[in-house]
């Protein structure tokens, strides 16, 4: 079986043109260099160098060199990375579960300099809560208020919902109704619009209606997409309306293409928090998370 060190020695002799120079670069004796070359020649059944006042590569050596030079360089790069990892203090791994719409929270300018390796899991909150409970993840970032027993919840920020539409939607009528606080007519106007939602149940709209109209909305969305970022993009390009959390409207490009129709007389708020087990999370890990989230 071929020894990869034979190829490394061959490459070095080829590049230096000298057994002595190769032995110095490889930190092995010259007889060992000669043994490696002889062993490789015996393995492939071809002479690789002509021994004169300096070693001259044969035609076959030229072919071998072109085939192995890039793989050898890549192996040396991998070796260098592993050596660097071994010489530096190992970083802790932090597993984070998060709802997709809050991924932007990881936009910290200090992300690459933080002393940790972050592994992020994006799933629905029900699955993430199970993973937090069984220890598969260390932190859960979500808008669910229900805290797991013995777990600590740290508030990140408060958000609220807006009814939004693209600039294509004529809002003169609704603006007058809102100014006059004519709730009955406001509700009629909203129901008549083209709605897009992330689900057919429209839980955010139901809560918004209950808070502001004291009733359940009679709305059937004509387009359902289970992604709030995608929904926002579609709304910005159509004559539709939707109900969206305020933090998603901070994108400057989309904000120019959207208009906030109404936030309600009674705002529908939600709290985004970070849950973790204080008995398992040491203070230095918590401090890294707080820096990551710029708390």
Image (cartoon, rainbow, N blue to C red):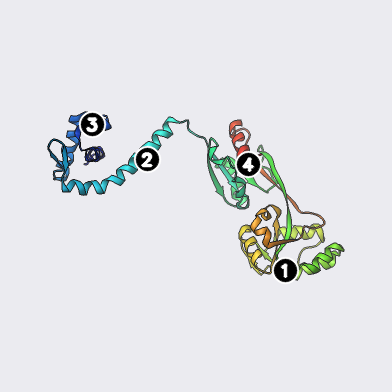
Q: Nearer the viewer, mark 3 or mark 1?
A: 3
Residue 82 showing in the rendered view: yes
Q: Is residue 85 left or right of residue 31?
A: right
Classify the position of the C terminus by image quarter: top right
Distance Cα–Cα, label 2 vs label 1: 57 Å
**What x and y, as percent, mark residue 57?**
17, 43
Pointer 4 with pointer 3, Cβ within 8 A: no
Distance Cα–Cα, label 4 vs label 1: 36 Å
Which numbered disc, 2 or 3, marks the residue that appears first in the sequence? 3
In the image, what residue occupies the spot 57% across and 50% down?
122
In the image, what residue occupies the spot 80% across and 62% down?
215
Residue at the outermost bottom position: 192
Q: Nearer the viewer, mark 4 or mark 1?
A: 1
Q: Nearer the viewer, mark 4 or mark 3?
A: 3
**What x and y, as percent, mark residue 25?**
27, 32
Distance Cα–Cα, label 2 vs label 3: 22 Å
Residue at numbered disc 2:
78
Q: Nearer the viewer, mark 2 or mark 3?
A: 3
Residue at numbered disc 3:
23
Q: Which mark is residue 293?
A: 4
**What x and y, as percent, mark residue 281?**
59, 34
SS category of the residue bearing label 4: loop
Residue at numbered disc 1:
169
> How packed is label 1: few (under 14 Cα within 10 Å), some, or many (20 or more)?
some
Q: Is residue 100 left or right of residue 215?
A: left
> How packed is label 4: few (under 14 Cα within 10 Å), some, or many (20 or more)?
some
Pointer 2 with pointer 1, Cβ within 8 A: no
């Amino acid at each position: 079986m071929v020894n990869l060190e034979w190829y490394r020695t061959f490459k070095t002799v080829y590049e230096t043109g000298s057994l002595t120079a190769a032995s110095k670069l490889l930190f092995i004796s010259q007889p060992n260099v000669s043994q490696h070359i002889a062993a490789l020649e015996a393995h492939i059944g071809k002479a690789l160098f002509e021994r004169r006042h300096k070693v001259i590569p044969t035609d076959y050596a030229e072919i071998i060199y072109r085939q192995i030079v890039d793989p050898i360089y890549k192996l040396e790069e991998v070796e260098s990375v592993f050596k660097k990892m071994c010489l530096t203090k190992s970083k802790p791994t932090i597993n984070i579960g998060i709802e997709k719409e809050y991924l932007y929270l990881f936009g910290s300018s200090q992300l690459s300099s933080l002393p940790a390796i972050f592994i992020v899991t994006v799933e629905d909150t029900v699955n993430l809560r199970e993973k937090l409970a069984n220890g598969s993840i260390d932190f859960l970032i979500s808008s669910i208020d229900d805290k797991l027993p013995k777990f600590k919840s740290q508030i990140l920020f408060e958000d609220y919902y807006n009814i939004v539409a693209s600039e294509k939607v004529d809002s003169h009528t609704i603006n007058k109704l809102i100014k006059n606080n004519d709730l009955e007519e406001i509700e009629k106007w909203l129901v008549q619009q083209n709605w897009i939602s992330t689900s057919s149940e429209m839980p955010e709209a139901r809560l918004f209606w209950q808070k502001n109209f004291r009733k359940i909305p009679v709305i059937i969305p004509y387009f359902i997409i289970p992604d709030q970022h995608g929904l926002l993009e579609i709304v910005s390009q159509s004559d539709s309306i939707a109900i969206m959390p305020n933090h998603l409207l901070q994108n400057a490009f989309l904000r120019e293409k959207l208009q906030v129709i109404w936030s309600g007389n009674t705002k529908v708020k939600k709290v985004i928090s970070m849950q973790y087990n204080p008995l398992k999370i040491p203070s230095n890990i918590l401090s890294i998370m707080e820096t990551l989230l710029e708390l």
